[in-house]
Image (spheres, grey):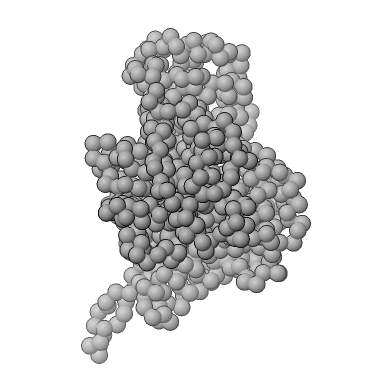
Amino acid sequence: MMPLVDFFDLIHTWTARGWLRPIDQAFVMFLHRQDQCASSLVLLGAALASHQLGRGHICLDVDSVLADPDETLSLPPETEAGEDMPAPPSRILCGLSKEIWVDEFSKSALVGKDTESAPLVLQQGRLYLRRYWQYTRQVAREILDRVGQTLPVPEDFEDRLDELFAKLRDSEEKKKQTIHWQSVATAIAAASRFCVISGGPGTGKTTTVVQILGLLQGIALEHGKVLRIRLAAPTGKAAARLTESISTAMDFLPEQLQAHMPTEVATLHRLLGTRPDTRQFVHNRNNRLHVDLLVVDEASMIDLEMMDALLDALPPHTRLILLGDKDQLASVEAGSVLGDICTNASKPSYNPENVNFIKKVTGYDLSAYSGPGTDMDQRIVVLRKSHRFHENSGIGALARAVNQGDGQQVSTVWEQGYADISRQVINSCEDAGFRNLVLDGNAKSFPQAAEQPVGYREYLEIMARGSGDWPSEDHWLRTVLASFNRFQLLSPIRKGDWGVEGLNHIAARILYNAGLIRTTRGWYPGRPVMVTRNDYTLGLMNGDIGIVLEVSIDGPQNHAKEKLPATVLRVIFPMADGSLKQVLPSRLGAVETVYAMTVHKSQGSEFDHTTLVMPDTLSPVLTRELIYTGITRARSFFTLAASSPDLLAAAVAQRTHRASGLGDLLSQGTGSGL
């Protein structure tokens, strides 16, 4: 056990070198003041638990840390090198056994049990900050309470399903010879208070949920009721995308139902009602939402704290349907809620009762997918058929190979000559090839493509033409925004030439040298920016993207007593409700240029042409889930830009793992015992 003086020196050094956050150190000092008898082993566990929280983990998994301290904690950081490096965790924890460390936790007044009030909680070899243990326990209880409730469906349910999906099923599905998973998802959602519909891009999640809403609303109307239905998504961009998708999918519903269907999609913050400068919401357990059925899209982006707040605000009778891709990256903030819920979803295991129910109400036989699944497993449906990526789609083939973790198959996909994927070998981001990619999407890389991909030149040329060529300035603004969203640079990392910070500088310089922007500094027309912190005063959320543009205002009178148009710089943000918000640049504090964004920040977005810029060396952040997420942001074209084309195949062997414990609780059955 390290003397406390040496321990505090170590924590100070780790913090000064950027290994720990200042808040991690402050937390340790706070705990020491609460209990000056606490040992260095307990305080070290607290420091590391706080550090892991900052990396997205809900807790410190003692087994994992002791098995491989440096890898589990990502310490030292990748950028750290040199002989003067402080002692890494592996040296500090060398020779420490789980029994000794857990015993120290158990004896400490700082570490309590489930129902106590100590700042730390130890549960099954995992050390939690108490607040996050409470989130974990409450989320599991709320979900399992809903999972345990079944609801009746009409006797003619199969006929209703056949009518709903008549135009959407192929001939084999209509004959019930192959499973139509959208029908299965509808049946499970109709009979449940809680369900998850997962699937990759283009598998019909939105179409399915619209059919579910139409079915349930139709049943309610037959009984003289109207369901209060709400739609939500984690970010403004995800909400805008769902709004667009929902409006298209509504066309498949009968006209009499469309009048009773929701058309507005709110962000989760707006749905719950934010309280500025607090972590609290207007709607909570004491002021529940007025909703009978809630659909939340892009559920993989929801962190544990937000999920707890959402479930806390739902009335007990409310149905909750989560939509999302279980194979995507977890949320930016701590937790991997959808991943924990869908732990077993890759291999469905529906129990006999559920198999019989599905057969009765849909006509489809799920015997091939039967097994001793948990209660949670019965409420999850994975849609398998992609309607976007057809059999000749390289994007689809590459995404599948990555998802399977098959490095050899990933390499093979590139050799198939697909028209919608391309590899650009670049030795540095200063290469002419990269310059062409930024400007024009490097169209030569897609010789078979009927529609050539674009870079950033297109939106900037539309901007330069001004609003005179368009029916209105609003039309011009929307065209510029839509054109910008056709192309996006993505990177797995933030720092360095290959990271977001370096790529944004390089992209701006390329565009400036091409005469497309007038400067690379400050607020200039054409600069795209991303909000990096929620601004409740302006109604902008973390992740919202806008473009700096010159918009007209009424100028002073000229000598002919006629008004001359004048312009002023505004940052134009597309909002979830379809409107445009114009904001003075001086009112925006927490923003960054976003010619390039991290793959994490791209979740909930799609672009016609996506370019993933890989770093020059393999890194722990390059995981299967990250690569899959980056690839599937592309609608029509995907480019891999890397110094080594083999790096992608190596990266898919690495998996994202977030210490949580939520999955274990969800596998235990009903929530009454939590």
Q: Is residue 64 left or right of residue 26?
A: right
x, y percentage for residue 33? Answer: 34, 17
Image point (71%, 49%), residue name: 410
For residue 563, what is the image quadrant? bottom left
Furthest-bottom residue in this view: 560
For residue 583, what is the image quadrant? bottom left
Looking at the image, residue 438 lies above or below residue 41: below
Q: Is residue 69 something that shows in the picture?
A: yes
Q: How many marks?
A: 0
Image point (57%, 23%), residue name: 65
Q: Is residue 122 left or right of residue 559?
A: right
Looking at the image, residue 92 lies above or below residue 395: above
Looking at the image, residue 466 lies above or below residue 166: below
Looking at the image, residue 469 lies above or below residue 359: below
> Which one is in front, 344 or 153?
153
x, y percentage for residue 232? Answer: 38, 51
x, y percentage for residue 289? Answer: 28, 44
> Which one is in front, 49 or 79?
49
Image point (72%, 44%), residue name: 407
> Which one is in front, 473 or 408?
408
Image point (36%, 75%), residue name: 473
